[in-house]
Amino acid sequence: MCNINKPISPHLTIYNAQKASIFSIWHRISGVIMLVLVISPFFILNNVYFSHKTVFFAQFLIDYILFNWFIFSCKLFVISIFLYHISNGIRHFFWDGVVHVNTTRMYKDSNQLLLFIFSIIIVQFYFVL
């Protein structure tokens, strides 16, 4: 009566994600991450300022948690997210101006975007170290 080997949603297994949809999803995710990175220091400062006890949180972070490699990787992560979001936004501005809207040019633009982002990240990695 019940076939256990039958897939629940076969459309998910045969779905091939398009490059434009992946870039759109990552553009939104990078925007949310940048929003959180901008707003979170205000909440942390608010909690530190309005706390009623002595706070040694900053010294604890510097001494035990934030090593040089951790700070460097966080900087690299934030810079790469920012570069991806800005360059993908510029690509969307080109699309709004009806420049490079055909399918072949869109794939070329997305490959150029990835090459640009990865090359900038590699250059930053070697020059910051």
Image (cartoon, helix red, strand yellow):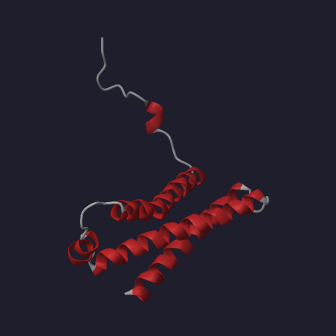
- Tell me which residue sits at (42%, 70%) in the image: 77
Q: Nearer the viewer, residue 64 or 70?
A: 64
Q: Residue 9, percent across and down? A: 43, 30
Tell whether 87 sits left or right of 1.
Answer: right
Quadrant of image for the C terminus: bottom left
Q: Nearer the viewer, residue 96 or 42?
A: 42
Tell whether 91 sits left or right of 6.
Answer: right
- Tell me which residue sits at (44%, 63%) in the image: 42
- Tell me which residue sits at (41%, 59%) in the image: 43
Tell whether 89 sits left or right of 45.
Answer: right
Quadrant of image for the N terminus: top left
**Which quadrant holds residue 99?**
bottom right
What is the number of callouts on the image?
A: 0
Q: Is residue 9 above or below residue 26?
A: above
Q: Nearer the viewer, residue 1 or 41?
A: 41
- Tell me which residue sits at (25%, 75%) in the image: 59
**Which quadrant holds residue 107?**
bottom right
**Which quadrant holds residue 19?**
bottom right
Q: Residue 81, percent across and down? A: 49, 66
Q: Residue furthest left?
A: 64
Q: Residue furthest front?
A: 52
Q: Is residue 29 above or below residue 15?
A: below
Q: Nearer the viewer, residue 52 or 29?
A: 52
Q: Is residue 112 visible?
A: yes
Q: Is residue 108 visible?
A: no
Q: Residue 114, percent across and down? A: 54, 68
